[in-house]
Amino acid sequence: IKIKITHIDIPVAFASAFEGEIIRRGDMQVEFDGSRVDCFELVQTKDASEVEDHKIEVIGPDIDEMPEGSKQSIAYVVEVAGKTMQADFESVFERKFHSYLNCVEGMMHTGQRDMIRIRISKDTYNAGFRLKHIGEVLYAKVKSEFAAVVDKCQVKICTDAAECTKLRHELATPVYDKRDERLTTLTDEGVDVYYSCIMCQAFSPSHVCVVTPERLGLCGAVSWLDAKATNELDPQGPCQVITKERPIDERIGEYEDVNEAVRKFSQGALEDVSLYSIIEKPMTSCGCFECICGIEPLSNGVCIANREYAGMTPIGMTFSELASMTGGGVQTPGFMGHGKHFIASKKFMKAEGGIERIVWMPKELKEQVKDRLNATAKELYGIDNFTDMIGDETVAEDPETLLAFLEEKGHPALTMEPMM
Ligand code: SF4
Ligand code: ZN
């Protein structure tokens, strides 16, 4: 018999009303920041004998031992066991942590994997909230929402900085890499179905992501394998099977089946989408895209900005300016939100010529995608070290300087067909 847990044992309220709550620097007791120190969140499938149900273990200092307003490391591992549990479900559980932890009054969570950031407010701390309560929330939600596959669940929370670093490299990174690797062997042509995702309709009511093996959700957190697992876990849930039997235009990746699905799941707000074009019927964007790409007319290519980049782009807009015109679940030809992983995909704006169109991206993002992007450029066009041809903020923040740089490097976009 499975018992459905509804009560969560924490000293503050837990409700979806708190999901959008912002905690300002002055109001925060402590911050865990994965962009500065080693942090991560992970779900691991274990044998039943290795999991003691509802055990919550804290390793390292608790919040009352941390200086007020400080930045700290945190790693939490949720270990689950169940007869029908599959390793493919792990990342689906992880994706939900964002919403679980945001439902805690006075707690803010952003990001995923090893790029999480968490703030806990002074009021929540003063109400008695401590690290074990993070474990209580994760335990209660995983046990209740995934009761069909989870029999036992335990949570380990670590705040010891050295241990977080060690665990990140030895435990978490290999798991993330393995998941990403599984995906690289899959192609859009090689599968029979795609999946829809409407998890973001709470914020963007008409937004639908179409998730394919070579194009993950724009949040970067929902791969085709994740969408498939989500559908298996909850067949009536946010991810539905989309067939791809009736192609309309293979060049831009348009299918009658996909259009029908998008029409249905957007309640008629969206007529048709393409999978591979940013100009013709581009996919919509909600608000949680990892990156935005936009056309830069002078260089006949696209610039990409990631969320972490605060500076100017040669398009003349910052990430947040681009975001304000790209989001909201509407189609904005010429601009598109997307996941970081999509940048090295052979399907990245394939209709407009593919990754050869990328003329600029922030240096840090370029470093992150370099290996995969260079490999794709080599395979598709025989170009070596393609990222050396792509500008960044150290080269140019305006179109004229960028163009001069691209000419010097002989960037392929300059000789391609005009985009507009
Ligand atoms: Fe799903 Fe797309 Fe939202 Fe990601 S961005 S959660 S894939 S709807
Ligand atoms: Zn979203």
Image: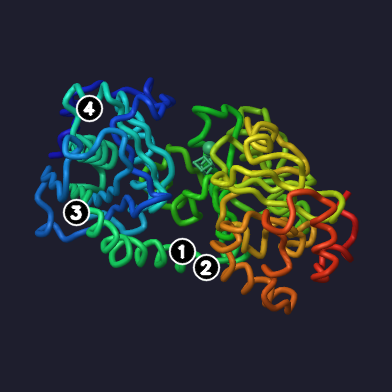
Asked if the residue at tag 2 contacts the one at tag 1, i.e. Cβ–Cβ closer than 8 Å, the answer is yes
Q: CA distance from mark 1 to mark 4?
A: 37 Å
Q: Position of residue 69 (x, y in %)?
A: 31, 34
Quarter of the figure with the N terminus: top left
**Of tags 1 and 4, which is closer to the observer?**
4
Residue denoted by label 3: 81
In the image, residue 26 sits, relative to residue 185, either above or below, namely above
Q: Using a 10 Å C-alpha cutoff, classify the residue at mark 3 as few (fewer than 14 neighbours), some (14 to 19) or many (20 or more).
A: many
Residue in the image at 29% along x and 35% along y: 30
Q: Using a 10 Å C-alpha cutoff, classify the residue at mark 1 as few (fewer than 14 neighbours), some (14 to 19) or many (20 or more).
A: some
Does residue 291 appear to the left or right of 249 in the view shown? left
Residue denoted by label 4: 125
Residue denoted by label 1: 180
Residue denoted by label 2: 184
- Residue type at mark 4 is Tyr
Asked if the residue at tag 4 contacts the one at tag 2, i.e. Cβ–Cβ closer than 8 Å, the answer is no
In the image, residue 16 sits, relative to residue 281, either above or below, namely above
Inspect this view and state whether residue 281 appears.
yes
Q: Using a 10 Å C-alpha cutoff, classify the residue at mark 2 as few (fewer than 14 neighbours), some (14 to 19) or many (20 or more).
A: few
Q: Position of residue 147 (x, y in %)?
A: 24, 41
**Of tags 2 and 4, which is closer to the observer?**
4
**Of tags 3 and 1, which is closer to the observer?**
1
In the image, residue 201 sits, relative to residue 307, either above or below, namely above
- Residue type at mark 1 is Asp
- Residue type at mark 2 is Thr
